[in-house]
Image: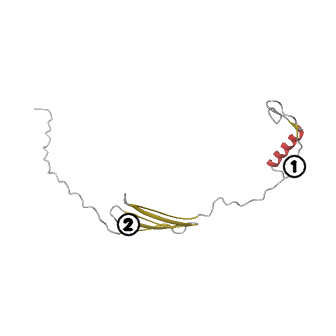
Amino acid sequence: MIGLTQLLCAAALVAVAQAGVIGGYGGYGGYGGYAAPVAVHAAPAVAVKAAPVAVDYYAYPKYSFNYGVHDAHTGDVKNQWEERDGDVVKGEYSLVEPDGSVRTVTYTADAHNGFNAVVHRTGPNVHPAPAPAIVKAPVALAAPAYSHGYH
């Protein structure tokens, strides 16, 4: 059985073979003139079937990284690492909270258990003293006087 693509290719080859000569404006003949005729010979049509090829469009996901910041000027201290092998991800990150404690989050993710994270806080919990409350004396308000307008 002949496919549509093979039929169109055969028709194009027959058309070129019947034309015999290809010529045209601005071709190989020079600047702006008509090109010299070029003989075209049709090659015999050959049906080629490509074997199906299994193509993996997605590469196997595997990586690892490590990242860290320790800025004494701003007090920004944090780090993170993560590893992935296929659909299994493992990692951990930590940072210094504004109260001085360190928050560390260890996490895993896979297709069976989903995403799981465990959070730990360590170190001093130094909270600044609260600002003194400003208490204002209550203000007595007079009751509004309503009048119906008749005397």
Q: Quadrant of the C terminus?
A: top left
**Image colouring:** secondary structure
Residue 78 appears in which quarter of the rendering? Answer: bottom left
In the image, is 72 to the left or to the right of 51? left
Residue receiving disc 2: 102
- Label whose residue precedes the other's in the sequence (1 or 2): 1
- Marks 1 & 2, CB-CB < 8 Å contact: no
In the image, is 59 to the left or to the right of 135? right
In the image, is 138 to the left or to the right of 92? left
Toward the left, the furthest residue is 151
Q: Is residue 22 above or below residue 100?
A: above
Residues at marks 1 and 2, CA–CA distance in whole angstroms: 75 Å
Give residue 107's position: percent from left, percent from top: 47, 67
Residue receiving disc 1: 45
Taking the spot 39% from the left edge, 66% from the top edge, the residue there is 103
Q: How many marks?
A: 2
Query: Label 1 sits on what residue type?
Result: Ala
Query: Label 2 sits on what residue type?
Result: Val
Give residue 133's position: percent from left, percent from top: 20, 56
Give residue 120's position: percent from left, percent from top: 39, 69
Nearer to me, 22 or 120: 22
Using a 10 Å C-alpha cutoff, classify the residue at mark 1 as few (fewer than 14 neighbours), some (14 to 19) or many (20 or more).
few
Nearer to me, 80 or 30: 30
